[in-house]
Amino acid sequence: MVGWGSDADPMPGQRKRKRKERDSRARTAARTAPDKGHWEVVFETRDVSEFNAHLRGLRAGKERFDGELARIDTLCGRLSHPTVYRLSMFVPYSAGDPDRERLEDGSCGGSG
């Protein structure tokens, strides 16, 4: 029986879509590599509706919002620690940035 259900025969257009998604993830990974910059927390809250409202405001704002350079973290809580929603943006290193120079020297982190 011939059908679309087997793994050998992907749905029409699926191979192209998957390739585009893979290429997009690779470009984003290259843009946000540790030697290119660092992640900086820009907003944090315990209220999911407040978090969603903040994201909507960023997307609707006049400033350009690059979603590929944003990272959303949900730190799942328990009874003693409530859930926290965190938005971080990737900040590229500039020329002469001391953090970048430490990374290139290999002396990043640690003591002594």
Image (tube, helix red, strand yellow):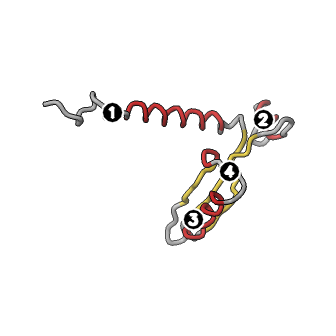
> Is the residue 88 above or below the residue 34 in the image?
below
Cα–Cα gap, marks 3 and 1: 35 Å
Amino acid type, residue under disc 2 in the picture: Ser
Kindly report which numbered mark, 4 or 1, lies closer to the viewer in this rendering.
1
Amino acid type, residue under disc 1 in the picture: Pro
Image quarter of residue 2: top left
Q: Residues within 10 Å of mark 3 (few under 14, many from 20)?
A: few
x and y percentages locating residue 64 in the rendered image: 69, 51
- Mark before the other along the chain sequence, 2 or 4: 4
Amino acid type, residue under disc 4 in the picture: Met
> Is the residue 1 above or below the residue 51 in the image?
above
Cα–Cα gap, marks 2 and 1: 50 Å
Residue where numbered disc 4 is placed: 89
Kindly report which numbered mark, 2 or 1, lies closer to the viewer in this rendering.
1
Kindly report which numbered mark, 3 or 1, lies closer to the viewer in this rendering.
1
* Label 2 residue SS: loop
Residue where numbered disc 1 is placed: 12
* Label 4 residue SS: strand
x and y percentages locating residue 62 in the rendered image: 71, 57
* Label 3 residue SS: helix
Cα–Cα gap, marks 2 and 3: 38 Å
Kindly report which numbered mark, 2 or 3, lies closer to the viewer in this rendering.
3
Which residue occupies 61% across, 59% down? Answer: 86
Which residue occupies 59% across, 69% down? Answer: 46
Q: Which mark is residue 75?
A: none
- Mark before the other along the chain sequence, 4 or 1: 1
Label 3 near label 4: C-beta < 8 Å?
no
In the image, is 70 to the left or to the right of 104?
left
Task: Say how many tags the image has.
Answer: 4
Label 4 near label 2: C-beta < 8 Å?
no
Which residue occupies 68% across, 59% down? Answer: 61
- Mark before the other along the chain sequence, 2 or 1: 1
